[in-house]
Amino acid sequence: MEKRENQDLLNMSRKIMQLAKDTITVRLRFFDAALAGLKIKEREHLNGYVRDTDTLYYDPATLLTDYLKEPAIAVRLLLHVLFHGIFLHSYRFDKTNEEYWNLACDIAVENTVLKMELPFADMTRDAEAKIRIQKLKKWVPGITADKLYREFAVNGISTEAEKEYIRLFSLDYHRPRTEYKEEPETILTEEDWKKIAERVKAELKSFSQNAEGEETITENLEEATAVRYDYEGMLERFAVLGEEIKINPDEFDVIYYTYGLTTYGNMPLIEPLEYAEEKRIKEFVIALDTSASCRGETLKNFLLKTYEILRKTESFFRKVNVHVIQCDAAVRSDTLITCPEDMDALIKEANFKGFGATDFRPVFEYVDGLISDRKIENLKGLIYFTDGYGIYPAKGPKYDVIFAFLREDKNRMPVPPWAMQTVFNEE
């Protein structure tokens, strides 16, 4: 008898899930490829729903219980999971705080569904969720996963707020990365999801109920498909192949060396190499845009992260020559860093000057002067932290340049071909 009841329960849950799939396929046809690739599996005693890249596990008993309270639960759950895929949330391994990232993704996805105004996906919590989103908009520039995560990572979340976000926006449990021995095998790859995302862009006007809904989806799609920059990797490009006085252990064998001295007098069998070549940053320029849009705390965080990367990768020589230049429309100050203690002091003091308009050219003119005066003799790189709204030099310098921007911004002027670009994330 119990076995039959369990089978009836399983059959009913499958019918609910199939009806949800059919509803989405008919009303939102661009989801057909995503739905075809999404694996849906029952798992008893799960007490909820678990998303594992492109697999959704659900507890039949939980689904039936939720269905009685919220008839749209299955449709909403599938939309929630599918938008996670379309927005490529599962592939952002650069986000170090999984808890904040998962929460940011859930809010971004639910906001997108709400903006689409789909009556067949309505839930009773929606009205309260909309109010909460309006409050979030007061200090978050856009309700996307990246922007929400940045806010959470920089300013944190109170325990009460976190519980509220989970109650209003979470539907599925995201499997922690630590449970993966390696990246999971998937039917839909990252490239597949990107193709689906492009299709969504093309069909926005046919399904979006209003301009605001279309704008929300577009913003999330642009964020999902944006080019990702590896700030740490780019910084390593500035490494200089130099020499530091020390014995190279790979080239020196002390046994043969002492044997030669003992046997032949003043004739070692192997002469130790006095120098070992290592990739270290020796001379470097960090230009900080102190215009009105680049505030002190952000500048401090940029310096701190840059310094941490250099320290972590052991990129400094014992004696360093790093110029930290503050500038807006003119060079305001130049602090010379010759040791780690100098950088510690600069970050601690954080006395930033300027906050006017932005012009990139004075920094390059100033650095050219330092090179001409032989105050810098082997400069290999300059990194310019800025909002991007300034005047670029007409001609590129002889050294490498990276412009590190505050955020993605399609309205700023394009970076000259002689420079590289990246986006600095304060997380």
Image (tube, rainbow, N blue to C red):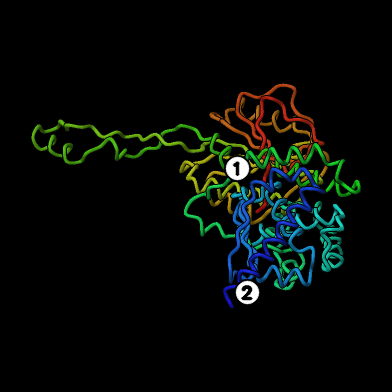
- Mark toward the viewer: 2 or 1: 2
How many other residues sit within 10 Å of disc 2, few (<14), some (14-19) or many (≥20)? few
Badge 1: how crowded within 10 Å, few (<14), some, or many (20+)? Answer: some
Count the numbered circles shown: 2
Disc 2, SS: helix
Numbered mark located on residue 5 in the image? 2
Which residue carries the number 1 mark? Answer: 189
**Residue 218 x/y as whole percent:** 80, 43
- Give the residue type that dot 2 points to: Glu
The residues bearing labels 2 and 1 have C-alpha atoms spaced at a distance of 38 Å
Above or below, 198 against 309 in this view is above
Rendering coords of residue 199 (x, y %): 75, 38
Is the N terminus in the top left, top right, bottom left or bottom right quadrant? bottom right
Q: Are marks 2 and 1 in contact (CB under 8 Å)?
A: no
Q: Mark number for residue 270?
A: none
Which residue is painted at 59% across and 33% down in the image? 381
Three-letter code, disc 1: Thr
Q: Residue at x 83, y 39 (%)?
A: 357
Percent x, y for residue 35? 69, 48
Q: Is residue 122 visible?
A: yes
